[in-house]
Amino acid sequence: MALHAQNVAIMAGAVGDEVDAVARALVERGAVRIDVAQTVLEKLRR
């Protein structure tokens, strides 16, 4: 599931260290989805 989460994070636009941070958040939430990844990435970039 971790590799899938990383791929979803990249599809959401995450780059560099953001990929791991977003992927971890997706796995922790148990929701490896593009919409969740976009929300996490938005919050991370604030």
Image: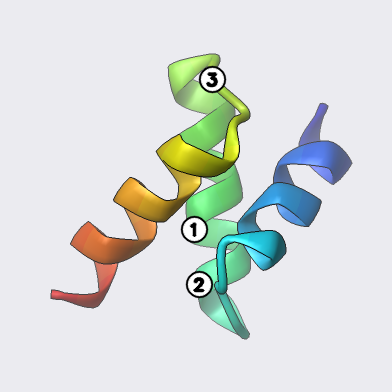
Give the label, 3 or 2, closer to the camera: 3
- Dot label at residue 18: 2
The reply to whether the C-beta atoms of the residues labelled 1 and 2 are less than 8 Å apart is: yes
Q: Horizontal and vertical percent for residue 23?
A: 60, 47
Residue 15 falls left or right of residue 44: right
Residue 13 falls left or right of residue 37: right
Q: What's the distance in space between the residues labelled 3 and 2, CA to CA?
A: 17 Å
Farthest residue, direction front: 35
Tell me the kind of residue under disc 1. Ala
Q: Horizontal and vertical percent for residue 34?
A: 57, 42
The residue that label 3 is drawn on is 31
Q: In the displayed structure, would residue 18 be above or below residue 41?
A: below
Q: What's the distance in space between the residues labelled 1 and 3, CA to CA?
A: 14 Å
Q: In the displayed structure, would residue 17 be above or below residue 29?
A: below
The quadrant of the rendering that contains the C terminus is: bottom left
Tell me the kind of residue under disc 2. Glu
The residue that label 1 is drawn on is 21
Q: Quadrant of residue 5?
A: top right
Bin the neighbour count of mark 1 within 10 Å (Cα to Cα): few under 14, some 14-19, many 20 and up.
some
